[in-house]
Amino acid sequence: MKEVNVGKMVHQQQRYLLSFQDKPIRRFLCCLVIGTLLFGLVWLLVGCGPRQTSAAEVAGPAQTIENKGSDTLVNLALAWAETYIELHPEVRISVTGGGSGTGIAAMINGTVDIANASRAMKPEEIAAAEANGITPLEFTVARDAIAVVVHPSNPVDGLTLQQISNIYTGKITNWHQVGGEDRPIVLLSRESNSGTYVYFLENVIRLGEKSNLLFSPDTLLMPSSEGISTEVRQNPNALGYDGLGYVTPDQKMIAVAQDASGPYVLPSVDTVNDGSYPISRPLYMYTAGQPNGDIKAYLDWILGEGQTLVPKLGFVPLR
Amino acid sequence: MKESQRFRWTEFAIEALIRVIGFSSIGFVLLIFLFLLREGVPVFFEAPLGNLFSTRWYPTFDLFGTLPLILGSILVTLTAIAIALPLGVATAVFVREVAPDWAREVLKPMIEVLAGIPSVVLGFFGMTIVAPLVRETLGVPTGLTALTGALILAYMALPTIISVAEDALDAVPKSYRDAGLAMGATQWQTIWRVVVPAARSGIVTAVMLGMGRAIGETMAVMMVTGNAARMPFTLDSLFRPVRTMTATIAAEMGEVAQGSTHYHALFGIGIVLFLLTFAINLAAASTIFRKRRRGGLR
């Protein structure tokens, strides 16, 4: 009880101090606060200068390779970078995701050394880069298959490309129309800044032909691969697509057939390599002009030894 | 004499400094608005108005119908406020009028902690826990709906509403309560008929500020509303996915080529959002000014 009283008293004293009405004291406090702020500013300005230069000197000998782009490739690019740094500790590699478009935009602006992309650069993007004095050079570093995924309890095992296209354009809206239960189909897609999205639109929804078919307006656009897998894991109505590397065991993959007569093929390293799985694509790295030095050594390693890491992340190696 | 002159000089310097800082914050808002206008207005010349106010948002293929996005934002925000208003006011009344001192001392900081939860955490919570709950209890095709977004937004707007409404209740003179109780009213009657109506304008301000917070929220909304740009016109729209203006800007700005129609369209959405938030804040401010004019007698 006594302690409580003491606490209250202290509290009141503090309040009293803060609400001081005497003008000189307020003025003094004002001066003090502003003086401290100014002093802090000056100290920051003076103090930071030399420290930054010393940091730059330390970082001098090591070259940092900036590597940015496709979210599909980001895990693989990280694995490559980590392994490569262990082998060559003098090299620094910084890997960031953000989407193929982000990586390519950074390449056009000249802010990255290597841009990762899950789609080829468009002609206008190459033109934009050349306008900035950069000639992007394309390297195929791995292959990827897009898996079509559903909730594990979904009885549907296989779909044709035409059926998937009809579902995603809103012509088929219930699972029983493709041999499943009587449930509405919830469509999941990546956001439009994803290379996977563009690839899926052009090669599955439009079946690789020139047409103006679009995703149905009811399609849920998820900002990340994680968003798609979370929803597919939880929702028995869901139909989603994502890179093979992102499919977790708690999602069910659908076997895809080119047309109704063809064989239904599940995506796997073998079916992608022999070309029987219909939705697969190359993954690219772009450099600004002919690479040299550390960047060239890194790319050579990726195309050679680095390929052993590719299957471990669910992608398909080149050889 | 000398002493006081020196003091006046420092006072002048400090006042000038504070004035510059104060005006610069207004200046920044103006500059931001000018920047928004510069980047956003070209869309009105690049895309026909019919396209801009159509119902299909598909910027990859030059369809810039902003209506589903504007309506989506409005639907989610209004629903969030409809949920947060009764909860927030009731909490404020409880904290201010009913709770004993020790409970108030615990509750107030807890409510402030609520305001500090990062929106991405709430978004993740909404995606993994609220969304499945919504889907299972309501039997809708997916849990990523306008309602889920509204629930998360209501939660985010609550701390603002509670603390502002509580301040408003705090400002009601004690004599009002005493008078109410002296007239033989019960505590509940005093609160409901006297104190809350007296604090009405402050409560309206609280709701407006909460609304401003809700309409501008991005990350959590992007994670839980499903982001499907459909028109929310059917009766069940609340239980269907929507795409808000903020989520659209956040999701697409990273990809867009600078200077393209899509880029200008995103800034155009920014202008709409800015104007909406501005109108809401203006409404909130006008209730505050009205309160000031009437002095203590509200």
Image (tube, rainbow, N blue to C red):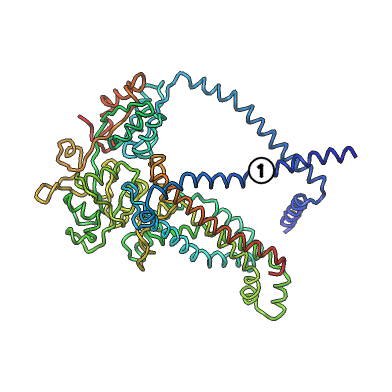
Q: Quadrant of the C terminus of chain B?
A: bottom right
Q: Which of B174/B16 is in front? A: B16
Q: Quadrant of residue A216?
A: bottom left
Image vertical order of residue B159 relative to residue A43, above or below = below
Q: Quadrant of the N terminus of chain B?
A: top right
Tell me residue A244's x, y (percent): 26, 42
Tell me residue A84's x, y (percent): 35, 25
Residue located farthest toward the left when viewing the structure as drawn: A261
Image vertical order of residue A104 relative to residue B67, above or below = above
Residue occupying image coordinates x 33% and y 65%: B139
Type of the residue with mark 1 = Ile
Q: Is residue B87 left or right of residue B290?
A: left
Tell me residue A267's x, y (percent): 20, 43
Q: Is residue A58 left or right of residue A186?
A: right
Pointer 1 residue: B21
Q: Is residue A217 left or right of residue B67?
A: left
Q: Which of A155/B27 is in front? A: B27
Chain of the residue under the numbered disc 1 shown in the image: B
Q: Is residue A109 visible?
A: yes
Tell me residue A35's x, y (percent): 73, 36
Q: Which of B280/A144 is in front? A: B280
Residue occupying image coordinates x 50% and y 49%: B118
Q: Is residue B128 visible?
A: no
> Mark 1: which secondary structure?
helix
Q: Residues within 10 Å of mark 1 (few under 14, many from 20)?
A: few
